[in-house]
Image (spheres, rainbow, N blue to C red):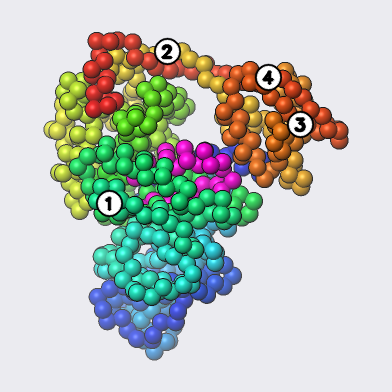
Amino acid sequence: MKKIIYSLAIASLLISCKSAQTTNVTPEVSVNIDLNNIKDDKVMVTVLPTASTEDVITFNIPKTVPGTYSTDNYGRFIENVKAYDVKGNTLAVAKMDDNTWRISGAKKLSKVTYWVNDTYDTEVSGGMGGKDVFSPAGTNIDPNCFMINTHGFVGYFSDKKEVPYTLTVNHSDQLFGATALVDTDASNAVDTFKLPRYATLVDHPIMYTKPDYTTFKVGDMDILISVYSPTGKFNAKSITPAMEKMMNAQKKFLGPINNTKKYAVLVYLSDMMKSDAKGFGALEHTTSTTVVMPEMMPADQMDEQLKDIVSHEFFHIVTPLGIHANEIHYFDFNAPKMSKHLWMYEGVTEYFANLFQINQGLITEEEFYGRMADKIHQASGMNDTMPFTQMSANVLTTPYKDQYLNVYQKGALIGMCVDMIIREKSNGERGILDLMQKLNNEYGINKPFKDEELFDKIVSLTYPEVGEFFKTYVEGPTPIPYEQFFKKMGITQSETKIPGNVFIKGQTPNITVNQATKEIIVLPGIELPEFYGVLGIKNGDIITGINGKNYNLDNIYDMISASQNWKENDPITVSLKREGKALEVKGNVKLPYEQAVGYKATDDSKKALKDAWLKG
């Protein structure tokens, strides 16, 4: 999973078909989702279980799903659960908690029905806080787009999690179901998917929209890109070239690792002017990823965001798809036991998402150092003495869950340091990618490892120094001395000035919006950056245009995006309204700057080793 906190500052501105009455005699659970009949923004699901030998069983909707590392209680979106025998008589159903229903007389059970509500309509923060489900892990029920994260629609019985599942979806023949699954039904209005077990079912999302997709090959892997854009601002054809270039570079970087033959990218673009998804980022699955981004984002920013987000998720085909612990392979959706190796599942994945870009020439050496420096800065704001393995194993509970976002910062830096150690000890011949390839060969998709044995296995494949690093900096409370590891590659710390944005500092905006008039207002009562003073812009002024382009709430993202490209002393003209009167101010851009720690290569004697690290 990758969360993008991109929305927080802007958000502060935008203040079933009837099943036959017969016993299911096949050794599988059959599920029907009827998308043709929406009632009060809900759809019906019908489940036909296998025969039960127990008189009392439970029916469960996941509390937590892999990749989210949060307690989301998807059962709270389920209503009116009913159980029937073969004659259509109801059986006793008792709700035990948000996610569990007890069914009595289960030996007679023929089917279970219930209604599913979606998560997008109720979002306030998109999973960035409070009780919202993180949008890429959420669900949408709309005639124009159904986001079927299957864990939000399909449940499991306590006595039959490991039996095969058949999922049938009835839908309009005008909609296309984008997924990595294979549809075994020839009809344009019915899709049927066969899965070996429940965990595989919930690992495969489906997005139903009017057909807007592209396909291409990366090596021998089939890639599907499907896009839902409510106004048509974006389409699959427009974003595919960047995705295809990136994925080909990733596959070249990965080399022989080849864990899947098909991969789907499902892109949902949210309408920020309506009750819609608000949590931006992506959720990985073993053969696909769900992406949610704001449709109002400018095209150049969309390309950059998708490149970083999808590259992260695509690298999950290495871990946890190919390399994972028992805790993930046999995941308990309602009483999960978490693995202690988030440093690998999310951290190494995030490190690869940056390393491959310098390796394949997509970014410069300086840009790569800048990204790592930013991660060091972000990690410094987290609890740097909390052992990473301890945080990982307890990530669902306080205080550990508050440190989760550090998996993308310190987790990636742990991967970088391990890479540096292996490069140094092997004289540049091997790195962490070589290690992950060996682990993938040792384990693979169907062979999990024991959580407590991974570090010893890694040391056996690398060097004792890697084990010492894990013991001291990953299992222990000692902060990582990053400058010592950079020094191994001939890189030293340097001070640098980083230009900021004139409208937003961090997550704190200098502007706000009048919802009624859609006007963009310079925040009253705050100290403004120099940019405003040199142009004569005052607190409370209304910005109506910049450099001849008009702006309001509808295109505020465009304004902020354009400002990202401003350079110091660029000429600028700002149109304003002040106390009801229109005026225009002209001058030169003065950007806010912050002192930051950076890195640069200074030791030529380590150049060969550094080049092996970044380009090998």
User: Mark 4 Cα within 10 Å, few/some/many (few <14, many 20+)?
Assistant: some
How far apart marks 4 and 2 lie (CA) works out to 29 Å
Q: What label does residue 221 carry, if any?
A: 1
Residue sitting farthest toward the bottom: 87
Residues at circles 2 and 1 in contact by the CB criterion of under 8 Å: no
- Residue, disc 2: 494
How far apart marks 3 and 2 lie (CA) works out to 40 Å
Residue 302 appears left or right of 349: right
- Disc 4 or 3, which lies upstream in sequence? 3
- Disc 3 or 2, which lies upstream in sequence? 2
Residues at circles 4 and 3 in contact by the CB criterion of under 8 Å: no
SS class, disc 4: strand
Residues at circles 1 and 3 in contact by the CB criterion of under 8 Å: no
SS class, disc 1: strand
- Disc 1 or 4, which lies upstream in sequence? 1
Task: Please give the name of the residue rendered at 43% of the width and 74% of the height, measured from the top-left corner.
Answer: 189
Magenta span includes 296: yes
- Disc 2 or 1, which lies upstream in sequence? 1
Task: Please give the name of the residue rendered at 35% of the width and 74% of the height, measured from the top-left corner.
Answer: 186
Residue 582 appears left or right of 237: right
What stretch of residues is rendered in magenta?
Answer: 288-315
- Residue, disc 4: 588
Q: Is residue 294 visible?
A: yes
